[in-house]
Amino acid sequence: MTTRKRATSEAASTTAAAAAAAKPLTTDPPMAPSKAGQILKVSLIFFVPYLYLILSHYNIEPDLKRSILISAAVSSAGFFLTLAMIPVASRYVLRRNLFGYDINKKGTPQGSVKVPESLGIAVGIVFLVLAILFQYFNFTSDSIWLVEYNAALASICFMMLLGFVDDVLDVPWRVKLALPSIAALPLLMAYAGHTTIIIPKPLIPYVGLEILDLGWIYKLYMWLLAIFCTNSINIHAGLNGLEVGQTVVISSAILVHNVIQIGVSSDPEYKQAHAFSIYLVQPLLATSLALLSYNWYPSSVFVGDTYTYFAGMTMAVAGILGHFSETLLIFFLPQVLNFLLSLPQLSGYIPCPRHRLPRFDPQTGLLTGTNDGTLVNLFLRQFGRMSEKSLCILLLVFQAVCCCFCFMLRWLLTGWYK
Ligand code: UD1
Ligand code: MG
């Protein structure tokens, strides 16, 4: 197939695995300093209200509050650890020829710099260490939560491994789409929670039930959700900072949602489910912020499929075990739109090139939308040509607006819907 051939040849010019034939570097290239200061300043917009909700606004039981704050402290340490690890890991991946070229800078001096690829591996390792160590502070050895927590970690770890395999081997597209279905298996097999759904109030007269047990269909839904979340983060990509930026925005929204639910509920099991999500998402957010400090425009590292798959799986697992998958899907609205726009190309109805990125004009430094079905191109076609940084900021603002819309929708529907 022409597309496949083109895909393979383009991949060979851009990804590290295919560049294995290149000579190993003898000197370490200089790396731009991190933008951690800037990133931390902007993230105060989230952290100040988030801490206010936990510490003052809601009356959260002392034990639960203690666990959340310990997880936050451990995650903060993870931020600095990841920040320190990325430059070291970058040198190692470059020595093994794991790099990519920045396509949206092609034709400028920056476009010929070898950018270290797959730095998601550093983030993922720190995340796993934090999440594993945290068990010591929260769970007793006979807790039923421990089984699901470790199954969740197994799925996340498996996904990271398959993402890294993809970065190194550059597997074909159709296979790539299937990788999350394998990684989700540990979670599906260990899941012992309920398989029931609460029927929305307006539908109860038609269904005749208030609670419906879906049995294996519920597990199928969990499986599909994990496949969707991982792939949808990976295909909403290609701009400096977009892969990590979207994860940071969604993770922040998940955390606020979890704290609100813990604050307003009186059901201990419901609170535990949301606390569970917090213990996974806090370390994800902290380590992602460290990665964003290097990945923000102009990127000095690329995150790789290791990161996109790992981040997607972590959020999916949090949504599944925290029992808020409908809310999660609304947080994922831009990803859902991007997926729908991508369907003709993903299904093979329209040829799908290896990279579906905008056209870059080295003279003006602006991007122009192409006909490839992505949200990135749609935004460019709607709002006109713009720089990569402005486009990324616009897409992240849109992501944040969708999250706010979800909170508003929940607030409006409370009491009427469920
Ligand atoms: C997915 C998208 C592809 C998009 C790519 C960008 C689909 C079906 N696939 O493929 O259209 O082009 O992500 O990540 O939608 N890169 C940049 N700038 C960035 C980030 C990445 O130029 O800010 C380039 C680099 O050359 C990097 C490469 O993209 O090496 C990584 O692409 P990869 O993650 O392997 O692409 P896919 O996930 O397969
Ligand atoms: Mg990718």
Image (cartoon, rainbow, N blue to C red):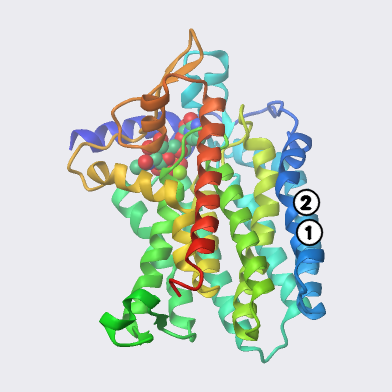
Mark 2 sits on what residue? 48
On screen, residue 252 versus residue 44, left or right, reads left
User: In the image as oriented, which residue stretches furthest toward the top?
Assistant: 363
Q: Residue at image x 65%, y 73%?
A: 264
Query: Residue 402, position in %: x, y?
Result: 49, 48
Mark 1 C-beta closer than 8 Å to ligand 1: no
User: In the image as oriented, which residue stretches furthest toward the bottom?
Assistant: 142
Where is 156 relative to 41, above or below?
Answer: below
Checking the image for residue 52, the label placed there is 1
Total numbered labels: 2
Disc 2 + disc 1, Cβ < 8 Å: yes
* Type of amino acid under label 1: Tyr
Q: CA distance from mark 2 to mark 1?
A: 6 Å
Relative depth, front residue between 88 and 181? 181
Relative depth, front residue between 237 and 114? 237
Query: Residue 200, position in %: x, y?
Result: 39, 75
